[in-house]
């Protein structure tokens, strides 16, 4: 695993050559966004891809992580997380534009993106809650049960060598009890 997650949580270096990131706009068109605008979804996609970038394994975009995050944050249970992420996302993009002469976060080089994410990881602009939330949601979307909308095709499972058991089927009440049992 390369990129920012490895850099920040494991103390590893980033990859020297970075494969082209998949096109997040194709993912955005698949179904309506629930939490983000197209612009903030592009920023979200770039952030998730830096946390879990594509290398020899699928990256966050390949795994459907941005779509998972969009859907997860739309739930009432994550209202406080949604508030933090939705508030900070335009600030991250604005910060990128200020530093790069007008380029949005998703248009920056991976190194420039890592520099900005590093500031947020350390509590920049009162965003001490932003980075842990986005990191957690990215990892959930990459390695959680595909039935929740991330981990596309179970590829996240394959990356970590996890082979889930097939789902159990509910038995009908007729078949649940042996014959002759009251």
Image (cartoon, grey):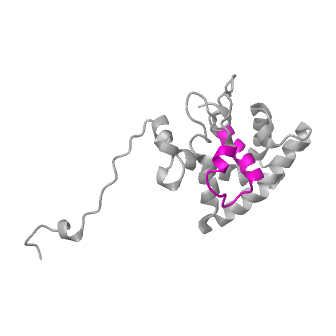
Which image quadrant is residue 77 in? Answer: bottom right
Q: Position of residue 111 (x, y in %)?
A: 77, 31
Query: Which quadrant holds residue 31?
Result: bottom right
Residue 147 in magenta stretch: no
Q: Position of residue 85 (x, y in %)?
A: 72, 56
Q: Name above or below for residue 106 compared with residue 111.
A: below
Q: Which segment did they paint magenta?
A: 25-51
The answer to whether residue 21 is left or right of residue 155 is: right
Q: Residue furthest left?
A: 180
Question: As drawn, is 149 to the left or to the right of 5?
Answer: left
What residue is at 60 percent from the left and 47 percent from the top?
65
Q: Residue furthest top?
A: 16
In the depicted structure, whether residue 168 falls above or below residue 101: below
Name the side, left or right, on which 12 lies relative to 127: left
Does residue 85 show up? yes
Indicate whether 2 appears above or below 173.
above
Q: Tell me how many marks there are.
A: 0
- Image side of residue 108 versus residue 177, left or right: right
Q: Main secondary structure of the magenta part?
A: helix
Image quadrant in which you'd find residue 13: top right
Residue displayed at 66% across by 27% down: 19
Residue appearing at x 66%, y 66% in the figure: 79
Question: Can residue 128 be seen in the rendering of this structure?
Answer: no
In the picture, the quarter occupied by the N terminus is top right
Residue 27 forms part of the magenta stretch = yes
Between 180 and 9, the residue placed more toward the observer is: 180
Q: Position of residue 32 (x, y in %)?
A: 65, 58
Q: Quadrant of the C terminus?
A: bottom left
């Amino acid at each position: 695993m390369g990129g920012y997650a490895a850099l920040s949580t494991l103390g590893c270096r980033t990859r020297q050559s970075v494969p082209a990131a998949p096109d997040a706009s194709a993912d955005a068109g698949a179904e309506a966004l629930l939490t983000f605008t197209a612009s903030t979804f592009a920023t979200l996609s770039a952030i998730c891809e830096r946390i879990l970038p594509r290398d020899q394994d699928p990256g966050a975009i390949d795994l459907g992580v941005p779509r998972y995050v969009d859907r997860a944050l739309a739930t009432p249970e994550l209202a406080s997380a949604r508030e933090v992420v939705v508030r900070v996302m335009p600030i991250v993009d604005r910060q990128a534009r200020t530093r790069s002469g007008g380029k949005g976060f998703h248009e920056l080089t991976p190194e420039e993106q890592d520099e900005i994410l590093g500031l947020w990881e350390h509590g920049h602009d009162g965003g001490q809650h932003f980075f842990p939330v986005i990191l957690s949601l990215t990892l959930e979307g990459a390695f959680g049960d595909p039935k929740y909308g991330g981990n596309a095709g179970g590829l996240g499972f394959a990356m970590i060598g996890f082979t889930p058991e097939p789902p159990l089927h509910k038995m009908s009440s007729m078949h649940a009890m042996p014959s002759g049992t009251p």
